[in-house]
Image (cartoon, helix red, strand yellow):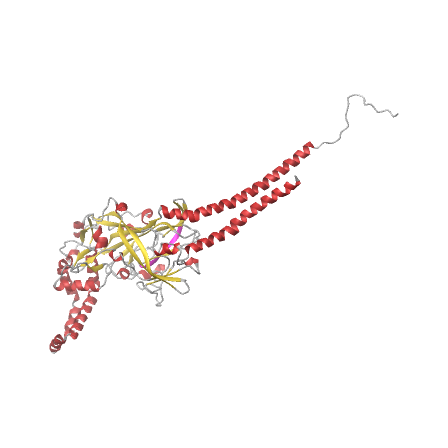
Amino acid sequence: MSKWILIGPLVGVVCVALGLILGYAVFPPMVKQKIIESVELNKDTEQYERWKELPLPLDFKVYLFNVTNPAEIQMGEQPKVEEIGPFVYSQYRKKYNIRFSRDKERASYYQQMRFEFNAEKSYPLTEDDKVVVLNVQLNSILQIIDKDFKQIVTNMTRGIEKQIDKTPVINVVKRMLDRYTPLQSILQLVESETPSFMPLINGEIGRVFGPTTSFFMETTPRQFLFEGVEFCKNPIGFAGTICDLIEKRNSTTITRSSFGNSLSFSMFGHKNRTHDGLYEINTGIRRLDKLLKIEKWRNARTLSMWKSDKHGAPSTCQYINGTDATAAAPFRKENDNFYIFSSDICRSVQLFYDNKIKYEGIEGYRYSTRDNFLSEVGPQYGTECFCVNKIKNALTNDDGCLYPGAIDLTECLDAPVVVTMPHFLDADERYGLLIDGLNPSHDKHKIFIDIEPYTGAPLRGGKKVQFNMFLRKIDSITLTDKFNIPRLFPVVWVDEGLELNEQMTNMIKNDLINVLTILDVVQWTLVGVGAAIAVCTLIWFVFAMKKKTVTKTTSVEPIYEGKTEVPQSS
């Protein structure tokens, strides 16, 4: 028995110690190393192939603001809109021209995006449904002309003069005319009289954009979003000159139509089967916390479309921070906030830890933007660098910044577009009071992403923004005569997101969750068995000692009733 009394507790202690050592000293670094190997960006690995071409498409959900009272708006009444959507497009991403630095710490690439309409997820909506929306190309071009017409005419007259100088015969005529009225004087007169050209522009609207009596147009999601709405169809005279100037601006949303005799506008056609510039990212080889962090975009570390600080140095608005939201650094803790970078709005977005979640049996952390994401813009917040003040007669404060909750993207998109959260969520109430039919909701309209904390893999998420334009009166433009109050008019909002499918969640479960569960079971089984052996041995020892004490006998003299006989000596 003494042998087992010593061996039992010893075996139990060894099992407990082994379980604790494996659980806290052996398994964690082993698992960590395997995760590192699985997430680092190395060629000839599954992770590299998944990064190079996303294994499943993102959902690009588009919600249009259908205008229900366009005629009344033209008469000066309050606009009424209704949300129609989602029109869901599968967004495929593939990287190409991938180059690694010599030390393998950085990789550069272009990324092509391809969009395909997903009829199943969009049902019952179709791409050919009729909608009435703001005539974005008309509004955009008129606002640009209204604000920059003097510069436009200056460029046009300089072009005319250069062309004349290059043409020998016409140059002779020019020199003859210069004896009486120098051409330069004529061109300067044209420049000085640019306001008088606005009525001329007003008369050419029908020839440029087609017969129209409204700032709104009936179209289809197919045309408006990707295929394009045609205008400038075979223009002649001054209308042709206007169309030439529009084309020469090289706006990403306006292209020459496939037939070559007109221009075409679309909201997102420029994103389809194209790239948005050269990226350079960190591979995480030396610093895992920088895994997939974008370090350069279009060969620059900062964004030129935002203002520098007062000393000319890069401002907080100009820095490129974060990943593209398709992955995050691994080994996350609850309070590890992080950034994503969005080229659609030319800025970095900070996401903050929100709460724990569970998606398809996988535990994760939810990160989201704060309510002040677009609201704290201005000198008092140190973010006046976002106040580019490029839109004429917009709703601005005295410091030139738009009312809270909106940012001017003119320099980013080369068009007078304003970004907000969907339905003006968390924006200044003055925006929403001027439009009927909006219903902001934090649950539906907030940016968020759910992350698996060990690997940094996204489980589910949505990058949500709304694109708007100011609707206002433009001098000498008849169609805007009744637009007495400038309004921020919603055009479209987008939810670009993902939800891992069953195949991907099973892969995470098999490669990580199940392994962690098995290791956890091994650890605590050893601890439990060891503790049980030790406790059982001690209990057995106590009972054995107790039994021995009870059964132990001792010699006792018998006692008789009455007189005790004393043995007689012989």
Q: Main secondary structure of the magenta part?
A: strand
* Horizontal relation, residue 526 to residue 139: left or right: right
Q: Position of residue 251 (x, y in %)?
A: 23, 61
How far across and how far down the image is residue 433, in percent? 26, 50
Q: Horizontal placement of 17 versus 91: left or right?
A: right
Give the extent of the magenta segment: 346-353
Left or right: where 269 falls relative to 478: right
> Residue lying furthest right in this view?
570
Q: Position of residue 467 (x, y in %)?
A: 27, 54
Q: Could one spot residue 115 in this view of the protein?
A: yes
The quarter in which the C terminus is drawn is top right
Q: Nearer the viewer, residue 391 or 177?
A: 177
Position of residue 321 measured from the top left corner of the image (x, y, whole percent): 37, 59
Q: Depth check: 313 or 367 in front? A: 367
Classify the position of the N terminus by image quarter. top right
- Residue extending farthest to the front is 44
